[in-house]
Amino acid sequence: RDVLGSRGLGDVYKRQQLSGDVETKTIHDCEMSVKKIPDPMEGTVLDPRVYADRKAAEQKENPLAEYVEIPVDLVRKLPAAPSFDVTETEVLTEKKVISTRNGDTDIYVYTPAGGMDKKPMLLFIHGGAFIAGSTKVVENFCKLIAEMSGAVVAGVDYRLAPEHYFPAGLYDCYDTMVYLYEHAKDFGADKDKIAVGGDSAGGTLAIGCCMLEKQAVDEGKIKKSRIRYEALVYPGVLVDNFKLDDYKWKMSEYDIPEDDVLAMGAALSLKAMTAEMPLLYTGKDEHVKDPLAAPLCAEDLSYLPKTLNVLCEYDYLRLQGEAFSRKLVREGVDVRTILYQGMDHEFVDRVGYCPQAYDLAAEIAKDLVQL
């Protein structure tokens, strides 16, 4: 409650659902459902919670400011955003150690009490720019999806770069998906209702799982993809921010008043991290345009399953996310794009604080129920 200030957790929780305040718009040739700020404030285009966080950060010393290169160890030690368990029913949490091609890998499984005998199953992969983070950061979001959908939700603590360069982390995620499929019955899940998803780098890895499934089909290892649905939450679909035929990052594409310095800062906040991703994640320049690392570079993605692509209005990754949705539409993929107004990156890490996190959990849950 100290983090939430005068609002209090209860006050925020009552306002969580945003789906009634949404309109369909075409922005940058991308059709999307635009979710409005529930309680806009004067003087900024940011959501009040984003504004408060960025205002507070502005008054503190930035521990990364003095470094020319991203200090990986320091990034990993940065405190997690405030997040609360707002589930109202029992969700069983189980940690397991499974064997992947890289060795032992930790996974977490969140199972709601009761419900269907054969539940849908979602592998939700955490973000962290491929170099940081863990399932614990998104645990409250995973539990909320599990409660709202009645589905089993799992997370994987994949190997991080730069100690383990691409594609090590991706293989951890893919092997976990295969494990969940093969052991679905053990979790009370339906192996024919497997989904993947993730936020930021986790979204990238979720797409990579779908691409590896296509490779397995092409090689005759399986008859068809086992993944029915993917939920991408502000995914990074390029490792480096280079130009493509349908993508070029420009600040002018963001609708920000000249005097809203905090909103400009939000839109630019991942620029430095993105610039260092090629070597931090892949280790080699020749991997920068590998579609498994940069899905927007793929020639054909028409085989992807039904897709939810979630974007934040003032996120550095927003424009590449829009380009990804445009690509999927052109290639005939069933894709739905949501834009959360006033938001910056990482809001699913802030369950019980950002109403948008609850709202998105409801959107994903709705899709899982329909599998």
Image (cartoon, rainbow, N blue to C red):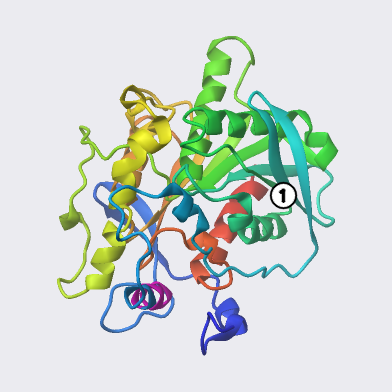
Nearer to the camera, 164 or 245:
164
Amino acid type of the residue tagged 1 in the rendering? Ala
Residue extent of the magenta highlight: 47-55
For residue 157: magenta?
no
Q: Residue furthest top?
A: 220
Residue 131, image x, y percentages: 47, 44
- Could one spot residue 238 in this view of the protein? no
Residue for point 78% across, 66% down: 89
Left or right: where 15 falls relative to 296: right
For residue 51: magenta?
yes
Left or right: where 118 falls relative to 45: right
The C terminus: image quadrant:
top right
Q: Secondary structure at mark 1?
A: loop
- Could one spot residue 258 in this view of the protein? yes
Residue for point 40% across, 30% down: 282
The quadrant holding residue 314 is: bottom left
Is the stretch drawn in magenta largely helix, strand or loop?
Answer: helix
Residue for point 53% across, 80% down: 3
Residue 254, image x, y percentages: 22, 59
The quadrant holding residue 64 is: bottom left
Badge 1: how crowded within 10 Å, few (<14), some, or many (20+)?
A: many
Q: Which residue is mark 1?
A: 151
Q: Is residue 40 above or below residue 304?
A: below
Q: Is residue 351 above or below residue 120?
A: below
Q: Residue furthest front?
A: 66
Nearer to the camera, 276 or 192:
276
Residue 177, image x, y percentages: 65, 33
The N terminus: image quadrant:
bottom right
Q: Is residue 216 above or below residue 250?
A: above
Residue for point 60% across, 24% down: 225
Nearer to the camera, 153 or 2:
2
